[in-house]
Amino acid sequence: MHSSKNKNVEKPEPFYRPSAPKQKTSAEIINEARNALRTLRTQRPFTPREGQRKLFGSASSRTPENRPPSTFSLHASSFESGESRPVSGTRLSPLDHKPKLLSSPTKDEDSSISFPKPPVDPMEVRKVSSVRARLCRTASQGNLLPDKIFLPDENKEGVNSEEPATMDDLSRRSNKSCLAELSPHSNFKDDGIPLIYNEHNKAEEQDFLKGAVATSPLQFRSGSDQIKNGDRASSNLSSTGWNKSGSKAGSENDSRVNETEEEENYWNVKIVPIVYELENEDNIENLCRACTSLHQALEEGNMFGKRFKRRSALLKILYKLVDIGSDPLGLKLARMILALKVSGKNLLNVCKLVFKISRNEKNDSLVQNDGLLDSLLEILRFEDLQTNNEAFLYCLGAIKFISGNAVLLNELVNKGAVEILFQLMKQINNIKENDTHFSNLGHLLVQLTATLRNLVDLPLSRCQLLCSGAVSELWVVLEQRMNDKDICTNIVRIFSKLSSYNDCCAALAACSRCYVLFLALLNKHQKKQDLVVRVVFILGNLTAKNNQAREQFFKVKGSADTLISLFQTYNEFDLNTKKEKHEREENKSKQKHPSEAEDVLIKLIRVLANLSIHPNVGAVLAANHHIVALLVTVLEYKSVDDCEELVINAAATINNLSYYKVRNSVIEDKKLHIAELLLKLLMSSNMDGILEAVRVFGNLSQNLEICDFIIQKKVYKFMIALLDAKHQDVCFSACGVLLNLTVDKNKRAILKEEGGIKKLVDCLRDFGPTDWQLACLICKTLWNYSENITSAASCFEDDDSNTLLVLLASFLDEELALDYNFDRDLRDYHKLYWETEFKPVAQKLLNKIQSHHSFLQPITITSF
């Protein structure tokens, strides 16, 4: 009962195939043609975008009290004015030197120096007392008076002891004292420094700023730390303790003591005027422009870094400007502060400042224009990880926010962010669990992996990940941080994206322990849906690629049990959810996306369908009662209108398992119940669902009981009607069922109903030249139908006979038959299939019609 061309008589072959695979030889295409076992595709799990930018999202497993804050206050007082303070915590020995208070000059001192006389007027007393109070208040904050104070002679020219100092004069003098700390030669007209002076004109102020006025050998350092200027506090640089040579006393960071005359002139001419503007300007735009000018001037003068004599004083001014609270200004300040290479608490605070500003998505354009990315990446490259892990946290948090912007994302990749993050990840992986920093570095890894998750959207970054070996380090992180749900979720999100690409998928599968780690994740975090759905999505991608991956996964101990356990858990969850929302079922059926439980089941069933393609694995799964029962349960309680993808995936998996004719097949035991469930799908308006049901009937109809069921339930009428679908796959599947029915002589007459013969001839005419498999299947069906009939007229109507004669004759002409524009592989495939399968059957059918008689045996589905 088989064709003479049949080479696989004992093993049933498929009656349909998936999309033609690429880059395969013609022989491989022939062997895989319309394979009965198909892999399934699905969408990558949907990740909703967070409404607000935070260190840890709303779904984080970290409680607020166990994670660093995303909101905090930040002021100038948060910064440290000096960075020479030791960080070791070691108590320093007290100094032998004791500061002296004001005393009478000794005989060794210049007798010409005398103390000023107190004013007699009570109002003047109050004014002087007010200034003194500020001085004392400053001293109480840590600025001690010097050993000896040299006062100018009260009889010097330009000092009017009879005219008291006004508060406006004192304020101006204090501002000039601030700038005097930045300039080593910024004195007044006389050798002594007056306590009171008249208002200077504009030209004199410019001369003062440029350092053009003659210097004084004696300088008086004011103890005042803050002098109000409008609404903003003005920085008094004298509180930093600059000595008369222009270097900060006691500062180990400002180590360039000797300054060339050229550098000094550059500072006085280029920098001091801008600093003066920063001290006295209130307009934000003007301040931003001044900061831009200052940054450019400092860069041109090679004054960035730690080896800069006036660094501490300049930083103090920049810190004060933070209190203004402007985001554009804050980014410019942060860039300059980072360029001055701050450390410790100040590095942390400037990272917090950038983090705070970058939380607002509207500031992304500011970040792009200010060129801050280089400064942030330099922190990760050059600063010490363990000493500055909190600063790294907020720095990476800011980079994570920035990477959400498509333009800035490209900039990050071009600036080498992938390699920098990879090296940082290696450092963290080298810190073991018993280390005191291990826990805090977990917070940092959350930011790092979240940033990588954004970066892998770009092809260049994916290439860099594969080439750098970052994938291997991610496996290490996953293994070390298995208990951290946030880190695990971020990593599986990265792998979820990577596994959608063939080369990346191969790199993931190359890890010998990948399946062990994935199964460990599923067992440990079984109820964390957003993690589980991504892991099973990745497994679906890996097992869709090759048989080796399917076999490796299934060989891992407990792999099948883990899948069954997940299936049961989320199936029960979905059933319970459906009961709870029974009153809102109508609204639920209109939702566009599957529920969380349904999404897990969709991806999980896809894994089972892909695994079943491997002959050994598929045979085992077909005999597994738990798996088949769960698949059947989905068809029982779900309709295609409830969740289309879930139902179709379940039917496709049953179809794959029904291919295996093993002795203890559960599909075989439940075949009639499955056929009943398929009727519901067959009668739906969903064409994809109908096609999947027909495919299952194609495999099941090799059984006589199912053939009887098809006749009794009038299912064959659906199959004949589907021949009009004008869809090749639908026609092929329906024709496969009809072919199996025509094996039984008593059922061949059904083709005369509903115009079955004419529809088969129409399909042959419409699809034959472009689909030789379908053409061959139609010829075999017509061959079986006409068996033992000696007259073609009694079998076919005249129109059908004439059409068949013309079609078969033309299809058997090789030049005409293969005169179609196929690519090279498909052309070879069509030619081989036409020669080996279609031509023999079509020739015999043509001869039979021409001779009006035949004694050939019927052809079954097992013949191709």
Image (cartoon, grey):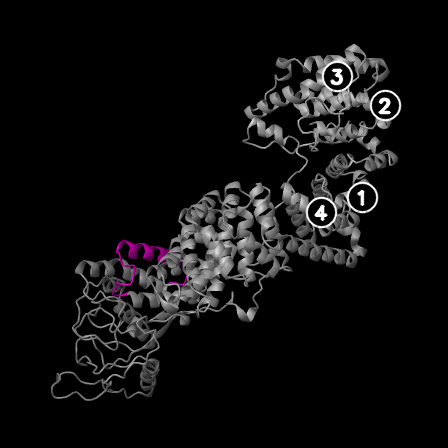
The residue under label 3 is which amino acid type? Leu
- In the image, residue 121 lies at what x, y percent? 30, 87
Secondary structure found at label 4: loop
What is the residue that sits farthest to the left in this orientation? 108
Q: Residue at x 72, y 23 (%)?
A: 3
Q: Indicate yes or no whether the magenta region holds residue 803.
A: no
Residue that mark 4 sits on? 623
Where's the C terminus, which quadrant? top right
Q: Residues within 10 Å of mark 4 (few under 14, many from 20)?
A: many
The range drawn in magenta is 281-310
**Pointer 3 with pointer 2, Cβ within 8 A:** no
Q: How many marks?
A: 4
Secondary structure found at label 2: helix
Q: CA distance from mark 4 to mark 3?
A: 40 Å
Q: Residue at x 56, y 52 (%)?
A: 515
Q: Which mark is residue 677?
A: 1
Q: Indicate yes or no whether the magenta region holds residue 289.
A: yes
- In the image, residue 684 lies at what x, y percent? 79, 39
N-term mark: 1 or 3:
1
N-term mark: 2 or 1:
1
